[in-house]
Amino acid sequence: MNRPVQPAPNYTNACLVMAGLNLFWIFGVIWVLIGLWAVMVTGYALDKLISWLARRRAH
């Protein structure tokens, strides 16, 4: 009953690829429904959010 503990597999690359694919199709849906300007505004807002989180985490 005592099984050795094994390390968990590293799914970082798979997670990043799936996040990129999800972002791609979500941007595509926004583009079709609202327009390219909405995709650009959303991308800019996400960029600012990620930068803010990186600065906050650095301190």
Image (tube, grey):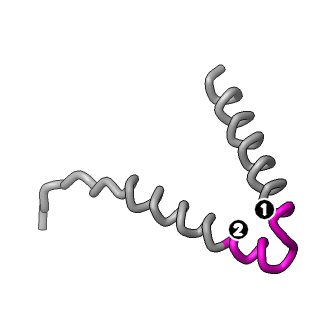
Residue 2 appears left or right of 53? left
Horizontal side, residue 4 vs residue 31: left or right: left
Residue at 13 percent of width and 61 percent of height: 3
Q: Are marks 1 and 2 in contact (CB under 8 Å)?
A: yes
Q: Residues within 10 Å of mark 1 (few under 14, many from 20)?
A: some
Q: Amino acid type of disc 1?
A: Val
To which residue does mark 2 refer? 27
Q: Toward the viewer: 49 or 9?
A: 49
Residue 31 position, x and y percent, is 77, 72
Q: Position of residue 15 (x, y in %)?
A: 45, 60
In percent of width and height, residue 35 lies at 84, 71
Quarter of the picture holding the C terminus: top right
Q: State the residue position of label 1.
A: 39
Q: Main secondary structure of the magenta part?
A: helix
Viewer-proximal residue among 52 and 47: 47
Q: Quadrant of residue 6?
A: bottom left
The image quarter containing residue 48 is top right
